[in-house]
Amino acid sequence: AQSVTQLDSHVSVSEGTPVLLRCNYSSSYSPSLFWYVQHPNKGLQLLLKYTSAATLVKGINGFEAEFKKSETSFHLTKPSAHMSDAAEYFCVVSGTGGFKTIFGAGTRLFVKA
Amino acid sequence: ETGVTQTPRHLVMGMTNKKSLKCEQHLGHNAMYWYKQSAKKPLELMFVYNFKEQTENNSVPSRFSPECPNSSHLFLHLHTLQPEDSALYLCASSQVSGMGSYNSPLHFGNGTRLTVT
């Protein structure tokens, strides 16, 4: 069975400071992991994807995530937040053998000027 | 510009109306999805179509009826809805491997904001 937990429903940072959005997963086999971003009144957009090629994955807009198998985590980070990063972020786990894509509940990121 | 187009962007309908949501993908994918996104609730998978065949129906009420005439088009027919069905309905597509793996990223449209009065 698979599951994904986003540890914070809301995160607030100041512009120019680092961003950390936390995600833990559970999977019976090697999962694929994703982060998506959703801006108001928009659909979800892929930020980055992990598929076992490298544990540190770089995405769009300066975001990156590190896969840590021992901690079953896939946290999303960015060195310096920008006002345009304010959005909702979803961690997603997917498996093989049929449709097994699970979305986390989402983390709302607020960026203060 | 998104490769997945949803129309209309906004829809207001009464509980006795019949309406349809349309989704078209221009990415050459072979799988399409309907998701429901309600305020303060997790994203809910409704239906999955793989090569035009419905492979998932996540216990969705029969007042929602999907149709997938080809791998590029997906419809959601709405009939006798309830106010609690008001939500953002998102369509997505992806490429499913020949082994039936759904590990490719989902590509989402911008959604239809549905209000049931």
Image (cartoon, helix red, strand yellow):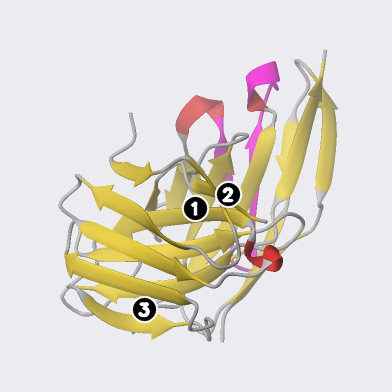
Q: Nearer the viewer, mark 1 or mark 3?
A: 3
Residue B105 shows up from this direction: no
Amino acid type of the residue tagged 1 in the rendering? Thr
Residue under numbered circle 1:
A55
The percent coordinates of residue A34 (x first, y second) are 50, 54
Q: Quadrant of residue B73?
A: bottom left
Q: Which residues are magenta?
A: A63-84
Left-right relation of A11 to B117: right
Question: Observer-nearest residue: A18 or B4?
Answer: B4
- Give above or below for B69 relative to B105: below
Look at the image and say whether residue B112 sits in the magenta stretch: no
Is tag 1's residue or tag 3's residue first in the polypeptide sequence? 1
Q: Are marks 3 and 2 in contact (CB under 8 Å)?
A: no
Contact between labelled residues 2 and 1, with CB atoms less than 8 Å apart: yes
Residue at x 48% of width, y 83% of height: B62
Q: Is circle 1 on the same chain as circle 2?
A: yes
Q: Name the residue tied to disc 2.
A: A66
- Chain name for mark 2: A
The residue positioned 46% from the left and 31% from the top of the image is A60
Q: Which residue is mark 3?
A: A96
Mark 1 — on which chain does it sit? A
Residue B113 screen position, x and y as percent: 56, 47
User: Looking at the image, is A91 positioned above or below residue B62?
Assistant: above
Does B117 sit left or right of B12 as displayed?
right
Frontmost of labels 3 and 2 is: 3
Camera sees residue A39: yes
Residue A68 magenta-highlighted = yes
- Measured in 3D between alpha carbons, the distance from the residue under mark 1 to the one under mark 3, in whole angstroms, is 19 Å
- Of residues B23 and A65, the one nearer the viewer is B23
